[in-house]
Image (cartoon, grey):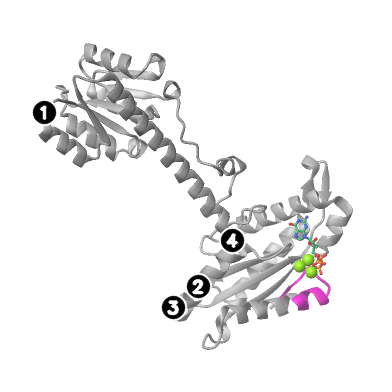
Amino acid sequence: LRARYATGKDLGVVGKLDTEVNPTEKRIFIIDDNEDQASRLKAAIGEDAQQIVHETDPEVALGRARSGDFDLILVNMSLEAMDPLRLCSSIRSFEETRLTPLLAVVRHGDTRKLVRALDIGVNDYVTRPVDKNELTARVMTQLRRKRYVDQLRSSFQVSLEMAVTDQLTGLYNRRYLASHLSAMFDRAFWTGRPLAIMVLDIDHFKVINDTHGHDVGDRVLKEFADRIANSIRGIDLACRYGGEEFLIAMPDTDLAFASVVAERLRAEIAEDKFTLNNGRDELGVTVSIGLASTEHGLEDDSAQKLIKRADEALYEAKTGGRNRVIN
Ligand code: GH3
Ligand code: MG
Ligand code: MG
Ligand code: MG
């Protein structure tokens, strides 16, 4: 599996959650086939009517709700052109509006409809005749809640991504590998299919850093990781194992096949130079690769032992002159 790339933009949202909302910046959608009443709702919510959109036709409203990216939807539960409960449940079922706050406007005393609306997933309600202060308060509460939930969700997603991926290369990190390798071993054991481990270490990387600077070194690492990611299969797991060291775990792969993959990768790295400074310079990079697989029996083979064998092969590749594959 290839890690999804964490983007800087996403990382920007980490930090303190800000639940202050300015209602005039929010997009509110009123679905009401009664023009007068919709106007009253608009006026009650706020002066800046630009952000408040109104639709009388419920069918059209459904389409607009899905494409409008609204922060809140108000539905008149006395709609006539469509069953308002069906309208609300459609809004809840669409992926685009699944989490959009839904506020029902119900006739005073219409408890049955209200209960059903709440069952369907309406977040809150106001009764008609609408009290301006109450409406504003409920709208604000929902907008605040929505903002909080949105921020929580995106920062949670970022935390998840940061926990399993290496920031520089976008590959999985060592911690993620550790948590998945034992499952890969179990699978190899139960299926009787071999699992191969490839350890890659860039040759004389220190020289690249010393000659061209740390930033160029970083770019080489990034491009190296991209090349790995592009040459593995979906079931393979590639991670940044250390500074300039990478590891690929390959399920259903014997040593012979892993050798072919490794040799192809080695040759591709050595032959296609890395581009620097936006294509103005090129840099030759080579890699040494060590391989090991579970073919010789799994009984007392642990993940750590397999990695150790691949590491020993890598050491042999280094001492044997680098830019080579050893298994
Ligand atoms: P060998 O062929 O024996 O592997 O030699 P080498 O120079 O690649 O190996 P060595 O272990 O001596 O040096 C690895 C260098 O990688 C040292 C370290 O400063 C550098 N390095 C580790 N992490 C990073 C990083 O994130 N960015 C950059 N630019 N350099 C890094
Ligand atoms: Mg080294
Ligand atoms: Mg190295
Ligand atoms: Mg190294």
User: Pointer 3: what residue?
Assistant: 191
Estimate how packed mark 1 is, as few (under 14), some (14 to 19) or many (20 or more) residues with alpha carbons within 10 Å. Answer: few
Amino acid at pointer 1: Gly
Asked where in the image residue 250 lies, by quadrant, the reply is bottom right
Q: Which residues are magenta?
A: 315-326
- Residue 64 included in the magenta stretch of the image: no
Q: Which mark is residue 232?
A: 4
Where is residue 68 shown, x and y percent of the image? 38, 26
Where is residue 80 shown, x and y percent of the image? 14, 22
Distance from the alpha carbon under mark 4 to that under mark 3:
21 Å
Q: Which comes sooner in the sequence, label 3 or label 2?
A: 2
Amino acid at pointer 2: Met
Q: Which comes sooner in the sequence, label 4 or label 2?
A: 2
Q: Which mark is residue 78?
A: none
Asked whether 157 or 96 is in front, the reply is: 157
- Residue 318 included in the magenta stretch of the image: yes
Amino acid at pointer 4: Ile
Along the horizontal axis of the image, is 318 left or right of 100? right
Asked whether 277 or 130 is in front, the reply is: 130
**Vertical comparison of 135 with 176: above or below:** above
Q: Which comes sooner in the sequence, label 2 or label 1?
A: 1
User: Pointer 1: what residue?
Assistant: 109
Estimate how packed mark 3 is, as few (under 14), some (14 to 19) or many (20 or more) residues with alpha carbons within 10 Å. Answer: few
Q: Which mark is residue 184?
A: 2
- Are the two marked residues, 3 and 1, in contact with CB atoms closer than 8 angstroms? no
